[in-house]
Image: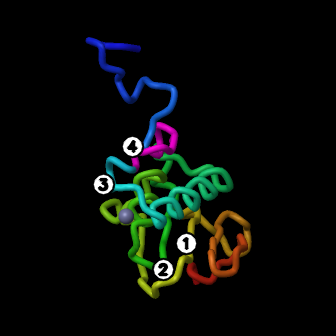
Amino acid sequence: MKKHGVINMFEAESLRIGTVIVSHELMGLVHYHGHLCPELAIGYRVSKIAMTELGITRENSLEYVAGAANSSSAVDAIQYLTGCTIGKQSFFIEDTGKHVYFFARRSLQPLTGQGLIIDLNGGLLKQNSKWYN
Ligand SMILES: [Zn+2]
């Protein structure tokens, strides 16, 4: 919808960053983080996988915890998208420099499959209660 001859960027179908067309969600993330970078894209994809697999939303994020084994731009994406944040004590970083991410329900019981680890080095999604024990 046009307002005073200017397209409201949050009402447009899609948005552009340079020559790339991105979703409103990704554009909001880029505004939050300050720029689009490879590690932000990794955090975006990791978050979308966890949100799909575990049903995490910003609205129910208090039921979940998340973690990262790095302190890269990806952690901004995870906090922005999932609502699991350091401030809510639902996001944790143990910086080993690896792209390994953890998501789980707070009520996770061992081996129930309600958590997942995404390890970009292995390229696999693994169910694992290791970080919870
Ligand atoms: Zn960045």
Q: Earlier in the sequence, mark 3 or mark 4?
A: 4
Residues under labels 3 and 2: Cα distance? 22 Å
Question: What residue is drawn where x is 36% and y is 21%?
Answer: 7
Q: Which residues are magenta?
A: 18-29
- Look at label 4 and name its amino acid: Gly
The residue lying at 63 percent from left, 76 percent from top is 119
Q: Which residue is mark 3?
A: 34
State yes or no: Cβ of the residue under disc 4 lies below 8 Å from any atom of ligand 1: no
Q: Is residue 22 magenta?
A: yes
Q: Measured along the vertical axis of the image, is residue 19 above or below residue 4?
A: below
Q: What type is the residue that disc 2 sits on?
A: Ala
User: Ligand 1 within 8 A of label 3's CB?
Assistant: yes
Q: Looking at the picture, does residue 116 appear above or below residue 35?
A: below
**3D distance between C-alphas at marks 2 and 4:** 24 Å
Under circle 3, the secondary element is: loop
Measured in 3D between alpha carbons, the distance from the residue under mark 1 to the one under mark 3, in whole angstroms, is: 22 Å
Residue 18 vs 99, above or below: the answer is: above
Q: Are marks 3 and 2 in contact (CB under 8 Å)?
A: no
